[in-house]
Image: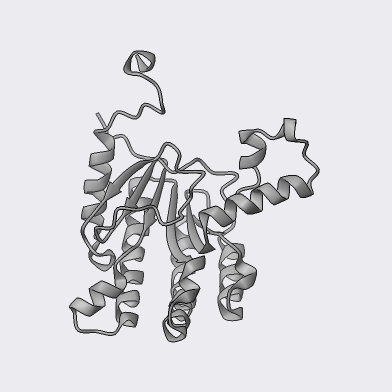
Amino acid sequence: MAQQLPQHVAIIMDGNGRWAQRQGLPRTAGHRAGVAAARGIVTECRTLGIPYLTLYTFSRENWNRPQEEVSTLFSLLVEFLTEEVPNMLRQSIRLNVLGEMDELPLAARTALRHAMKRTAQGAAMTVNLALNYGGRDEILRAARALVADGVRPGDVTEETFRARLYTRDQPDPDLVIRTSGELRISNYLLFQCAYSEFYFSDVLWPDFTPELLRQALADYAARNRRFGKTQEQMA
């Protein structure tokens, strides 16, 4: 029997800075190595047939990092998009952004909008980049949108709320992976992860290989997902 694969994998790519420190390199080198790791994971998910992948790329809290590091992160993003759009087109991958793009640097906004437009017809896989993203902020924005749309309190349902999230047309993550040994969710997809399975790896993100991804997927496939139901209800 084929291994049960998740429809949506979300990853918290943690540990770039610590990886660089251990190598005696600047933090920027860790972020560059992290981009290479992300490229390999995207390719592996496409090969396996996982239709949705979300990568926590830049949180709203990340603006508090040193300006040089922030600038490097967005430069790497533009470089990544420039190199990867042709590959995404060949593989029928659609690029999507979760977060507020209008607050990003101009070069990053321009590159993202160009990439999203070019790949809009990708039907085999969707890659979400969570950029300038925060789970609490997303929930607040959805609540404000309901108010602005004049939705009456009695008409607010999970469906009407979900329709105002960044992931409105996508399934919730089945599996959330966090690297680097940290055991927290870090304000990531708070609404969407209500019934996600979690997998924590001690490996720093730049060293997280496709083989390690397959190990996480095998662990996921061996679990019995109950969604709040008892074993008898599942039977």
The x, y position of residue 33, in whole percent, is: 30, 74
Task: Check the image and name the residue furthest to the right.
Answer: 150
The answer to whether 161 appears left or right of 182 in the picture is right
The answer to whether 86 appears left or right of 180 in the picture is right
Q: Which colour scheme is used?
A: one colour
Q: Nearer the viewer, residue 130 or 142?
A: 142
Is residue 13 at all visible to an observer of this figure? yes
Rendered image quadrant of residue 107 = bottom right
Rendered image quadrant of residue 202 = bottom left
Circle count: 0
Quadrant that contains the N terminus = top left
Residue at point 26% right, 61% down? 180
Residue at point 34% right, 81% down? 28
Residue at point 31% right, 34% down? 4
The x, y position of residue 84, in whole percent, is: 44, 69
The answer to whether 201 appears left or right of 193 in the picture is left
Is residue 82 at all visible to an observer of this figure? no
Q: State whether residue 33 is above or below residue 223.
A: below
Quadrant that contains the C terminus = top left
Q: State whether residue 220 is above or below residue 30.
A: above
Q: State whether residue 224 is above or below residue 11.
A: above
The x, y position of residue 44, in whole percent, is: 32, 54
The answer to whether 23 appears left or right of 139 in the picture is left
Residue at point 46% right, 79% down? 70
Q: Nearer the viewer, residue 140 or 1?
A: 140
Q: State whether residue 216 is above or below residue 56.
A: above
The x, y position of residue 217, in whole percent, is: 27, 44
